[in-house]
Image (tube, helix red, strand yellow):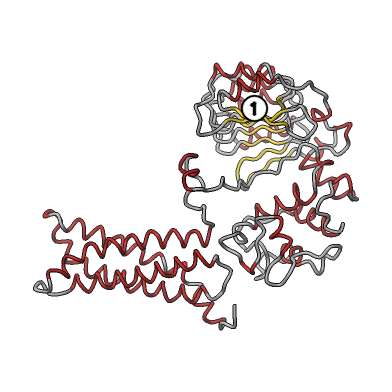
Amino acid sequence: MNGTPDFVIFLGRFHPLIVHLPIGILILAFVMELLSRKEKYSSIGEATSFVLFWGAISAWGAVILGLMLSQSGGYNEGTLFWHKWLGIFLAIGASAAWWIKKSPADASSLMKKAYLPLFSLSMVFLLLGGHNGGSLTHGSDYLVQYAPGPIRSLAGASKPVEDKPIVIADINKARVFDELIHPMVKQRCQSCHNEDKTKGGLRIDTREKFLEGGDEGPIFVANDLKESALYHRITLPEDHDDHMPPEGKRQLTDDQIAIIGWWIGQGAPMDQTVAEIEVPEDIREILEKQFGPMDEAAQGVFALQVPAADPSAIQSLAGRNGRALPIAQEQNLLQISFAKDSTPFANGDMKLLSSLSEQITWLDLRNTSISDFSDLAQLTHLSRLHLEQSAVQDGDLASLSGLQHLEYLNLYGTDITDDGLKHLENLPSLKTLYLWQSKVSKEGAEALAQKIPGLEINLGWDQTIKAKPEVQASI
């Protein structure tokens, strides 16, 4: 912090709280000014000067606290520069607008004419400065990251980083750092350690920056957990000042912490696969719980040898904005998904999947326009199925009853009820079921969990139902 007194940083941290005052007050004053120009609301104009005064005062307060906060460092210099000066211009513009507004009626006509353009320009400073502030806190793509595809592309924004389970087809072949460690750390820590916001001088958004470390040097030391800042911070009590991620943010799970500790303890290998390093029994259990069996003989559908897909079938799918990708190198099994912002994939298009019935093992039909799901019964090698926010109904799940390899099913945001779950009772491989914001009751979910050993049902942020130990022991 370049020798900045702690008390200055302490005061500066009130900036995010105070900065919302001028935003709200000045927008209110601007709306009042526009309305007062209509005869019906002319009386409002008398109060505009008072509101504008406090908007200018609060703007200067936010500027002063913001300048204090900027001394703590860890922000993108370019974005900080514009946020700072746009805030200063806003405070000056609001103050000048207030001065003109309160001036006597016989004041210079030129000055009076400058009032509304100056006030309007101040609103532009407010919008641009607010956007830069959001970029400093949440990243440069924050505003448009979840916008429709064309808008996101026009703005040059990246797709949002999704906080969802890491998917690995064959855990034995997975590169430990690139496919396990880096993705899980990015999911939890990238919001504070990215190109725009580098708390502690640390960025973890790229492999190179992760290895480079922060102001205090590298964040891990191979074979030494005690000297590895990464491991030390994630294992501190959550209410400790140095704990990462900070209290209130999504935390790493105990299993993820154990995997990171194992990786460092094995010498922090950067290019080796899981099969190439020692895996203790406790870590093996964690990896198998999340990514499937490590024993090749028990890998289910992934151990199958299926013929290569018909290129013409893949081409036909591409014509409906479908994307077919192999789930792993040297694998003919495919994952199929559809562009969200494209022409809707509808009932008649389901026949396109039939010619790929042997190869499809991951299928993503979320947000599509399908109402007839009967063709899913032909996809006998299906192991992962996304139907979230689709039109799937209870009766449609009967088409899944014969899918013996189905391990993952997402029914988030659908109209599925307890009755629909009865069609899933004979799915021996089902391990993960998402039912958040569906019409399934907790009792219905618990009843299904009793029928399928090892099943984990997610009903929301803090409601996870698992098969009881005695059911799992009966496998």
16 or 447, nearer to the observer:
16
Q: Which residue is mark 1?
A: 421
Quadrant containing the C terminus in the rendered view: top right
Q: Residue at x 16, y 68 (%)?
A: 112
Q: Residue at x 68, y 16 (%)?
A: 355
Expressed as whole percent of the image width and height from the top left, the position of residue 19 reads 42, 67
Q: Residue at x 34, y 60 (%)?
A: 124
Vertical placement of residue 160 versus 413, above or below: below
1 or 405, nearer to the observer:
1
Expressed as whole percent of the image width and height from the top left, the position of residue 431 reads 74, 35
Vertical placement of residue 29 versus 241, above or below: above
Q: Rate crowding at label 1 as few (under 14), some (14 to 19) or many (20 or more) other CA atoms within 10 Å.
A: some
447 or 386, nearer to the observer:
386
The reply to whether residue 121 is visible in this rendering is: yes
Number of numbered discs on residues:
1
Vertical placement of residue 462 versus 123, above or below: above
Residue 30: quadrant of the picture: bottom left
Image side of residue 322 versus residue 227, left or right: left
Q: Amino acid at mark 1?
A: Leu
Expressed as whole percent of the image width and height from the top left, the position of residue 389 reads 54, 33
